[in-house]
Image (cartoon, grey):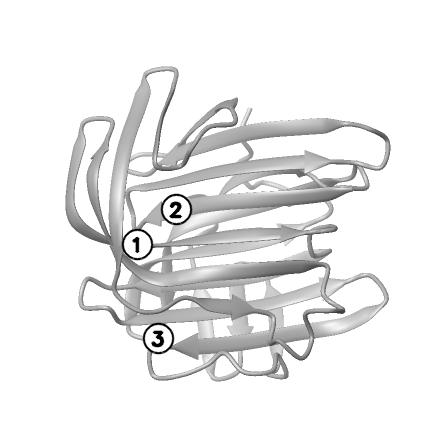
Amino acid sequence: MRYATWYVIVAGVAWIRRAWVETAEGRFEDRTWAVTFGDGSPVVRRGPGMSVREGRIDDLAWSLDWIELTPPFVTPHRALRRLAPTTMTTSPAIAVSGRIGEVTLDGAPGHTAQLAGKRHAQTWGWAHASAADGRWLHLLTATSPRRPRVSQHATELGGPGLPFASGSVHESDVRVGPYVASAPPESFIGLRYLDTDSSTIWCYHSEAATVGDFTGAAMEIAVREPIGGWAVEP
């Protein structure tokens, strides 16, 4: 049983995510979500697995290219990778060009990551901000079965190191070390992910978080039961 995910976020514009999952029961799912953000509520489109660089779901087509503004980093720290259920490689600041629907992009700030492993984290709180000048900020706090919570933070100035920072998720706040990411509850949209044990993960994503001196940052809160009153894709 394995899973793999590749996503790209154009800050405040779109989140395109492809994930395939195979479970111990023999289920297999290969799906792409394209979520667009604008003045109104986020719009979620789902389709078969396709590249996050180029594709189409229903009335939304995209064709993207990007350059990395800073080197990628790998989570978790290499000392813990043998024990971790997931490994993530993040390009924390990219300049994106191309089109998403009717939106033309020319060096728009964003980031991209690829994840793979035996299973997802049990729960997580995450935030990521990036700017056109290459600055970025990353927060992550996560739990796995029978293991303690691990938390880390990093910026373009350094990190992440070993995930030993203090971390917590409370309502619509994610706290890691000296940082707090916060977003209005109404700005989150929930997606339902399949895990490799055939369980459901409720992942709530916002592009309206404030963290450090960034606004309009990406933020997620992922749990194993739906959060009452928060929007979930149909």
Spot occupied by residue 220 in the image (x, y as percentages of width and height): 52, 54
Spot occupied by residue 21 in the image (x, y as percentages of width and height): 68, 36
Indicate the quadrant containing the N terminus: top left, top right, bottom left or bottom right. top right
Q: Amino acid at mark 3?
A: Gly
Q: Check residue 8 in the rendering and tell me which mark sits there, or answer none.
A: 2
Spot occupied by residue 82 in the image (x, y as percentages of width and height): 73, 69
Q: Earlier in the sequence, mark 2 or mark 1?
A: 2
Spot occupied by residue 102 in the image (x, y as percentages of width and height): 18, 27
Image quadrant of residue 150? bottom right
- Calculate the distance from the C-alpha at mark 3 to the C-alpha at mark 1: 17 Å
| Badge nearest the viewer, 2 or 3 | 2
Identify the residue shown where x is 71% and y is 72%: 149
Residue 226 in view (yes/no): no
Q: Amino acid at mark 1?
A: Gly
Vertical comparison of 164 with 35: above or below: below
Q: Earlier in the sequence, mark 3 or mark 1?
A: 1
- Write down the residue under mark 1: 110
Q: Image check: 11 left or right of 185?
A: left
Identify the residue shown where x is 28% and y is 74%: 213
- Calculate the distance from the C-alpha at mark 2 to the C-alpha at mark 3: 22 Å
- Calculate the distance from the C-alpha at mark 2 to the C-alpha at mark 1: 7 Å
Contact between marks 2 and 1 (CB within 8 A): the answer is: yes
Contact between marks 2 and 3 (CB within 8 A): the answer is: no
Q: Image check: 102 left or right of 207?
A: left
Q: Badge 2, how many Cα within 10 Å: few under 14, some, many 20+?
A: many
Vertical comparison of 147 with 12: above or below: below
